[in-house]
Image: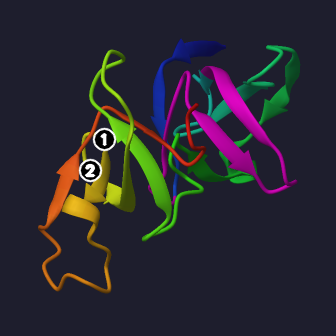
Amino acid sequence: MFTPITTATDENGKTFSVGETWATNFGLSFTIAAIVKSDSVRGSFIIILVHPATGTHEGVYFSSVLESKVTPYSDFKIDDLVWVRNNKSEGWIPRYFARVSSEGHPMVFSYGATSVTTDSPNYVTAWNFCTKIKPE
């Protein structure tokens, strides 16, 4: 018997939730559509993956195929030039990427600073919107 669940943690301590997108060990990224645990095997669960863009079913897998969680800022590197703003009515401001906050907000160096020009890791500001592509 299988029971649907929304979150699971595997034997390596990785936690998975429905709706998250993960990179797989076969080189593609997929969204977790469902997690089901086995009522007969303690701690065992399987994950149903779908393609994030099309929603098409990809397959049923064990958590071992999932390597890393994909976030909106997964490909951002420290000191990447980015464009930020807090709401859609504001103009975009160029800044340099610092990190992602524990709440998932992009953090950028304040006033055009970079990791090279400041020695304070706290000289950063959180923003609501951040992109690497210069907006028109």
Residue 89 included in the magenta stretch of the image: no
Q: Residue at x 79, y 14 (%)?
A: 55
Q: Given contact means CB atoms under 8 Å apart, are the residues at marks 1 and 2 in contact?
A: yes
Looking at the image, residue 8 sits to the left or right of residue 39; the answer is left
Residue type of the residue flagged with mark 2: Ser
Q: Name the residue beneath numbered marker 1.
A: 105
- Give the mark count: 2
Q: Residue at x 31, y 41 (%)?
A: 105
Figure check: 111 above or below 23: below
Figure check: 17 above or below 89: below
Q: Quadrant of residue 30?
A: top right
Figure check: 87 above or below 104: above
| Residue situated in front as seen by the camera: 90 or 75 | 90
Q: Name the residue beneath numbered marker 2.
A: 101
Residue type of the residue flagged with mark 1: His
| Residue situated in front as seen by the camera: 44 or 82 | 82
Q: Residues within 10 Å of mark 2 (few under 14, many from 20)?
A: few
Q: Residue at x 48, y 51 (%)?
A: 14
Q: Which residues are magenta?
A: 12-35
Residue 17 included in the magenta stretch of the image: yes
Q: Where does the C terminus fall, quadrant-wise?
A: top right
Q: Position of residue 31 (x, y in %)?
A: 68, 28
Q: Quadrant of residue 83?
A: top left
